[in-house]
Amino acid sequence: MKEEIKRIKNLLEKLSNAHGISGYEGSVRAIIKKEIESYVDEVKIDTFGNLIAIKKGKSPSVMIAAHMDEIGLMAKYVDDEGFVRFAKVGGWFDQTLLNQRVLLHTKKGVVAGVIGSKPVHVMETEEKKKAIEAKDMFIDVGASSKDDAIAMGVEPGVPASIDQRLVGLANDTVTGKAFDNRAGGAVLITAMQRIAGTNLKPTVIGVFTVQEEVGLKGAKTSAFGLNPDVAIAIDTCIPGDHPGIKKTDSAIQLGQGPVITVMDAGGRGIITHPKVLEWLRETAKAKGIPYQMDVTERGTTDASAISLTREGIPSGVISVATRYIHTPVEVLSLKDLEKAAELVVEAIKSVGGYF
């Protein structure tokens, strides 16, 4: 088990430390391609940018999706002094952005910067009582003027990501950026590697999707083109095991195994197909894999888009409980990550009994 944990940690570290906001996933895609191409029969990148890895077999065809993108920022205006105003790409809570280091990915190379705002020392009393909003923040790249910033390659349209690296915590937990959803990517890569060389009946299609954080876009286009018989999305979900959140909001805990979604977004996202739910639960039980069940009224995943493709594709979700999602310091359990990969592998092996 220790070796498996070490391998999946190393993989997550590569993926988490990489930079790829929605619409600019190329560097992450390159890492995934290198990790997976020798384990599958075919790797291709579709028109929209999704990476599709296929282990050929017969029926049923199983699509397993994990999105590559992370939330980020985009430069939208450089002022005369060289400070950069930005737009948010994806769902940020503004307070988590302030005073973070960022990397701007220009055509001339990577430019480091920091997110600043009006200093508290010169704020009026009423200003200090209010949270600072993203519209009042800016990126400081050290430029002396607008022309200086532009000479560095900093201009409107340049994407930016948080400058943060994975660090180990106690009890096989780790912290880093973009675990949503590089955790899912690590699980999917690991599962595809483990089924390589096995004589499985189903066709397995691993899809590393783009632009999930801004509308589940890659899942929509890839699922339409592939038209699988059944699908699983691998993602992260919110646990209720830390201060500030009630068990009635989430009973999920770190270290208690992968999470099977019953419903998300109050049913506006996915209500998991009954056969998919049975398949995943019974597989976990049969193989002694600890698991948790999740019902939530917020958030959704690629499975929602996949399930609504064409005439409908039976879909479900396997998630990894992750604290502080959509911040630069997300936290998860490597044991949960490993068990999620095990559940995906066993589900692939047992899918013929259900579809």
Image (cartoon, grey):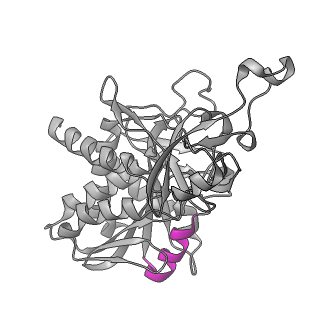
- Image spot of residue 91 (x, y percent): 63, 49
Please report the residue visible at 60 percent of the width from the left and 44 percent of the height from the top: 144
Rendered residue at 38%/61% (across/down): 27
In this orientation, which residue lies closer to the viewer: 105 or 189?
A: 105
Q: Position of residue 143 (x, y in %)?
A: 57, 45
Q: Is residue 226 magenta?
A: yes
Report the magenta residues as a range.
Answer: 216-228
| Quadrant that contains the N terminus | top left
Q: For the C terminus, give its image quadrant.
A: bottom left
For the point 25% across and 43% down, which residue is it?
10
Instruction: Quadrant for residue 29, please give it.
Output: bottom left
Q: Magenta: predominant secondary structure element?
A: helix
Is residue 128 part of the magenta span, yes or no?
Answer: no
Question: Which sits in the foreground, 283 or 266?
Answer: 266
227 versus 134 height, above or below:
below
Q: At x 56% / y 56%, what residue is drawn?
A: 154
Give percent across and percent down for residue 256. Answer: 38, 33
